[in-house]
Amino acid sequence: LWLMTVVWFFLPPAHSSFALTILASGSSGILHIQFPKRNHWLVNAGRQAPSNQARWLLAPLLRQAGVNHLGGILLTDFSARHRGGLPTLLGNFRVGRVLYPAAVKTPPDWSRYLPKIQLHPGEQFRIQAKGGFQILDVIEGQVLLVVDYEERKFLLLPTWRPKFLKKALPRLKELSSVEVLILPASGEPDEALAKEIFSHLLPEAVVFPRRRPSQEPLEPAPGTNQGREDL
């Protein structure tokens, strides 16, 4: 079995054609992003074994939403938990392209997946004029990924490892702010490093993944004006 968490982020009515959905947290880290004009993207394809997440989770959810074409799939790395479901998705949906970080080693069978585009650290990929992806950096094999739409930024922090965070801080400080900060699903933060990240980015909302979905409403984190969502 896999851990599945679903959270929707909709922008205000003027931006209602954009939505970001967290389909799986934990090690899978799967996102579904809908840009305007029904331009659907996935971040990561899920694992293939012991349960094929693309077959049993992603495909049913996408079809239920009326999706039969994906603008693309962005892989944050080539681990089995992130690319295992790629053949299933390519076999069941029309996929415009596959994006991947240039700084990670490609698997031997990668040449058969076309078309594909490398993204270098710091490079932006525009889905439309008002939205897209940016790989801030690849550190210790982990990707710092920003999803943006109309200057609103969603930052995915992949791990709490102090070594990673210390190397990531200079890149994070290049961001003036983020609207939503999505935190790692496991591990314990270094208090000093976490405080420095939060005080610089000043997110409007923070996502804390956990194993059991919460029924608690979105409310400010203690001592701040920021929203917090526990998953």
Image (tube, rainbow, N blue to C red):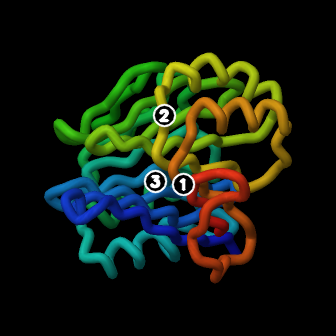
Residue 12 visible from this viewpoint: yes
Q: Quadrant of the N terminus?
A: bottom right
Discs 3, 2 touching: Cβ within 8 Å: no
Disc 1 target residue: 205
Discs 1, 3 touching: Cβ within 8 Å: no
Residue in the picture at 39% in, 26% down: 118
Disc 3 target residue: 86
Rendered position, 168 above or below 96: above
Rendered position, 123 above or below 107: above
Pair 3/2: label in front: 2
First along the sequence among labels 1 and 3: 3
Q: Quadrant of the C terminus?
A: bottom right
Q: Could you tell me which secondary element the residue under label 2 belongs to? A: loop
Label of residue 177 in the image: 2
Task: Please tell me which residue lies in front, 31 or 95.
Answer: 31
Q: Residues within 10 Å of mark 1 (few under 14, many from 20)?
A: many
**Identity of the amino acid at label 3?**
Leu
Q: CA distance from mark 1 to mark 3?
A: 31 Å
Residue in the picture at 45% in, 34% down: 100
Q: Position of residue 201 (x, y in %)?
A: 56, 34
Task: Please tell me which residue lies in front, 165 or 180.
Answer: 180
**Identity of the amino acid at label 2?**
Ser
First along the sequence among labels 3 and 2: 3
Q: CA distance from mark 3 to mark 2?
A: 33 Å
Residue in the picture at 57% in, 22% down: 173
Task: Please tell me which residue lies in front, 206 or 63.
Answer: 206
Residue in the picture at 29% in, 62% down: 12
Q: Position of residue 52 (x, y in %)?
A: 57, 68
